[in-house]
Image (cartoon, rainbow, N blue to C red):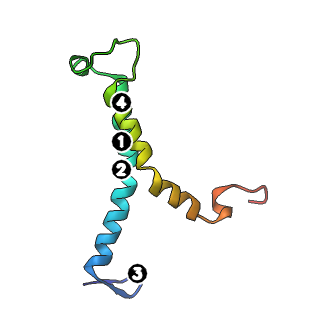
Amino acid sequence: MRLSAAHGKVETSAGWLAEVVVWLRLAAAPTFAVMAWISASGSPAMTLCSAVSAIVPINDMTLMYLLMSLFHAAPWLKLLFALPQGRRTQTEGD
């Protein structure tokens, strides 16, 4: 068990593990998006694995990474819609 000095409460290891899981879920979508970008931008070593011409930057790996990024976007959408309405949009009075 851990004592959180900032909140003055005791956290169990399950609470700590839940925080790690939340951060890992949030890290998946951007990681796959970056991997799709790297795959689409191409490198000389990647042309050996691709049967597609160099004109079309979307190869099989890029498509797979884009789909994985979309499938893992749910935690980001939950986080976005969990924010209060005032924090999502900027009003004129602020």
Q: Does the CB distance between marks 2 and 1 fall below 8 Å?
A: yes
Q: What residue type is labelled 3?
A: Ala
Q: What residue type is labelled 2?
A: Ala
| Rendering coords of residue 61 (x, y %) | 31, 30
Closer to the eye: label 1 or 3: 1
Q: Which of marks 4 and 2 is nearer the N terminus?
A: 2
Kindly identify the residue that appears in the image at 40 percent across and 81 percent down. Answer: 6
Quadrant where the C terminus is found in the figure: bottom right
Give the spatial CA distance, label 1 vs label 3: 34 Å
Q: Which amino acid does label 1 sit on?
A: Phe
Q: Which amino acid does label 4 sit on?
A: Thr
Quadrant where the N terminus is found in the figure: bottom left
Q: Is residue 8 above or below residue 65?
A: below
Give the structural element (helix, strand or loop) at label 2: helix
Q: Nearer the viewer, residue 17 or 66?
A: 66
Name the residue that disc number 1 marks: 32
Name the residue that disc number 2 marks: 28
Q: Does the CB distance between marks 1 and 4 fall below 8 Å?
A: no
Q: Callout 2: 10 Å neighbours few (<14), some, many (20+)?
A: some
Give the spatial CA distance, label 2 vs label 1: 6 Å
Kindly identify the residue that appears in the image at 58 percent across and 60 percent down. Answer: 81
User: In terms of image quadrants, where is residue 47?
Assistant: top left
Q: Callout 4: 10 Å neighbours few (<14), some, many (20+)?
A: many
Name the residue that disc number 3 marks: 6
Give the spatial CA distance, label 4 vs label 2: 15 Å
Give the spatial CA distance, label 3 vs label 4: 43 Å
User: In terms of image quadrants, where is residue 15?
Assistant: bottom left
Name the residue that disc number 4 marks: 62
Q: Is residue 31 above or below residue 51?
A: below
